[in-house]
Image (tube, helix red, strand yellow):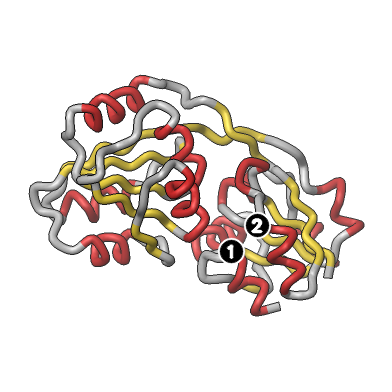
Amino acid sequence: MKIAVTKLEEKSEGIPELFRRYGHEAVIVSTMRAAPPTDPAPLSHLAEMISRNKIDILIFTSSLGVEKLFEIIKPGKNVRIVSVGPKTAKKVEEYGMRSEIIDKFSSDNFAQYLGDIKGKTIGIARAEVPNPELVSSLISGGATVIETPAYRLVAGNSIVEILDDVDAVIFTSAKSFELSGFAPEHAKKLKVIAIGQKTADIMRKHGINPNIMGNGTLEDCLSQL
């Protein structure tokens, strides 16, 4: 199948090869692009706390968050780094550091994975999309949380123009769907796939019921095709 997949250009490395392993062709459509955060002060504050050894745990939910923070400062080896997914962990390694990998990103799963965090200070470098559930779960465990926008996502390319040339489309985040221009009438001729629960929920709110919902990874989506 020829499959459109919504991915940031900066995060699309390895995707064509992955799709070929499953016998498909990927058409990468960047329905959003990365821009500097609206307010750079919080990221500078997190960098300052790292420089003063005031951060115990760093959480990265994307490789771009790693890049934006590590361009400013890299933490010492005593800081525990946790990455969501292998691609994020690979980006950490590119900067000469190691991180733990958590495959499934949910607030409850994260809190359970981290274990005893009472009295710890946790920094999160992420897109400018708040995750109050994650922050609340960490605070309820006794941690202090410094949640920092490292970049923001703005509208990129519309996916509508290429829909006649593909057999399916995978939306890799709720935001990438919302900025795509995709509408219910477009779903009639295509297999529509949500990478995970949150993306599927947003799609349903817009009148689109995905044919497939993954567990948060492209690999799972492709294995279900």
Residue at horizontal 49 percent and vertical 47 percent from the top = 91
Quadrant of the drawing holding the C terminus: bottom right
* Residue 195, quarter of the rendered image: bottom right
Tell me if residue 221 can be seen: yes
Furthest-front residue in this view:
96
Above or below for 86 versus 180? below
- Residue found at the very far bottom of the displayed protein: 224
Q: Residue at x 40, y 33 (%)?
A: 69
Q: Which residue is mark 1?
A: 195
Tell which of 123 and 95 is nearer to you: 95
Q: Which residue is mark 2?
A: 171
Horizontal side of residue 223 vs 143, given as left or right: right
For mark 2, does the 10 Å Cα neighbourhood hold few (<14), some (14 to 19), or many (20 or more) residues? many
Residue 109 spot, x, y in % from top left: 31, 66
Task: Name the amino acid type tagged 2.
Answer: Phe
Q: Amino acid at mark 1?
A: Ile
Residue at horizontal 61%, vertical 58%? 203
Asked if the residues shown at circle 1 and circle 2 are in contact, with their CB atoms under 8 angstroms apart, the answer is yes
Disc 1 is placed on an element classified as loop
User: With 48 as the anchor, is 38 left or right in this view?
Assistant: right
Residue 188 visible in image? no
Q: Residue at x 78, y 47 (%)?
A: 159
